[in-house]
Image: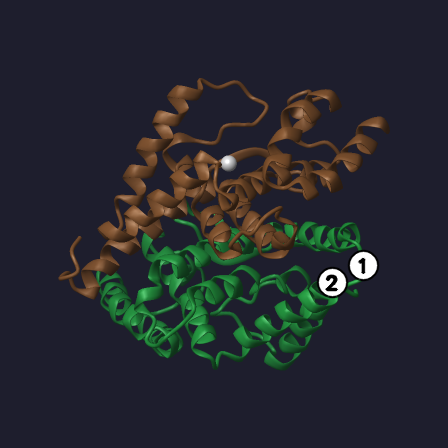
Chain colours: A brown, B green
């Protein structure tokens, strides 16, 4: 869209996007909330944004909490077309990346042009996992589920037969990458949980 | 808590708060998502934050989108203790306010002292509905449900036997208060919906 478009036409596009986004509430994840119900990707995105709001001081280098929150609010929208990929499941990475990229282009392409391009760039930044903001956001996305598993007494670890060694090997590097202080806090708690089994 | 507390002790408090916040996912609202399922207050908070992110340009005066997003991320946490109040339901306002204030003090009181005080002040600002940021945030909170009702073909309007006149009288002023441009966009769409019945 161009700047000459009226406010009403911009709103038409923005509201179509926001009502399409409503569908994220119907995307089910592999993680369970602490009442045992499978988490959906919309409430997950809210929870992560709240994690960023509260835990920003623990980022390892200068980050913008506001940009991290924005990233986390939009990071899972692609699942509307592409679905959620359980972390401990199996997936064809290349096919999944292509599917998610197409989804991002379709969804953010519903918005007025410059606004959609900004959000598409923010989503690519998150996915690339290289800037401090993206690294912290990605690490929060990995840090929240084990905390839900601890709260629900096993959760997706049980559903996927995850052992402590597998958890440490696969999740440790991903959380440490952008949030070493959060990993240092979490690791002994997960260890204690598995050792009590 | 005091600044001399270790990072680990701050994290203990912050994580207790964040895991308590998980309970917002189990608070059911009167509004239905466009698939007909009743919305919960966590996914609602995510949706509203996304509304703020996308619609900030339509605020009537200078606002900080980032502060509005923060407000919306925390605005419903009190429902963990106090429950949701359907807009078209009946309620004892004074009792509800006392209950929600106690909830806010308990929940934000779980955080390190200065951080909790900041979020409590932000929640009070939202509730007071006087600053431009709070007015826009409150108006988004009123603007989203009718859009879901339009998408689901009636939703809470049918559940509460809401007529077009009642909608205009009770919702119009609340949305116009902080977001007149959004009301101007919405009002004819709602009118057309009711006139087709
Ligand atoms: Ca995800």
Q: For the view shown, which residue lies furthest in the right direction? A: A196
Between residues A99 and B168, which one lies in front from this camera angle? Answer: A99
Residue A67 drawn above or below residue B131: above
Instruction: Give me the disc on residue B112.
Output: 2
Within-10-Å neighbours for mark 2: few <14, some 14–19, many 20+: many
The mark nearer the N terminus, 2 or 1, is: 1
Work out how far the residue at label 2 is from the one at label 1, CA to CA, in angstroms. 9 Å
Tag 1 subunit: B
Q: Position of residue B127 (x, y in %)?
A: 55, 75
Tag 2 subunit: B
Which residue is depicted at the point 35% across and 57% down?
B54
Q: Which residue is mark 1?
A: B5
The answer to whether marks 2 and 1 mark residues whose Cβ atoms lie closer than 8 Å is yes
Image quarter for residue B2? bottom right
Locate residue B48 relative to residue B22 in the image: left or right.
Answer: left
Q: Position of residue B90 (x, y in %)?
A: 54, 73
Q: Is residue A174 visible?
A: yes
């Amino acid at each position: 869209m161009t700047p000459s478009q009226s406010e009403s036409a911009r709103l038409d596009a923005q509201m179509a996007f926001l009502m399409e986004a409503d569908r994220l509430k119907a995307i089910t994840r592999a993680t369970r909330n602490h009442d045992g119900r499978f988490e959906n990707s919309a409430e997950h995105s809210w929870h992560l944004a709240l994690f960023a709001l509260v835990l920003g001081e623990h980022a390892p280098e200068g980050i913008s909490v506001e940009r991290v929150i924005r990233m986390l609010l939009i990071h899972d929208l692609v699942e509307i077309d592409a679905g959620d990929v359980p972390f401990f499941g199996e997936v064809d990475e290349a096919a999944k990346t292509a599917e998610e990229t197409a989804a991002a282009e379709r969804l953010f392409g519903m918005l007025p042009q410059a606004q959609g391009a900004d959000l598409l760039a923010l989503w690519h930044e998150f996915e690339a996992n290289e800037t401090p903001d993206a690294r912290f956001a990605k690490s929060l996305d990995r840090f929240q589920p084990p905390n839900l598993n601890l709260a629900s007494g096993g959760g997706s670890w049980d559903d996927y037969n995850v052992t402590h060694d597998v958890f440490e090997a696969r999740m440790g590097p991903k959380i440490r990458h952008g949030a070493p202080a959060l990993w240092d806090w979490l690791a002994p708690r997960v260890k204690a949980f598995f050792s009590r089994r």
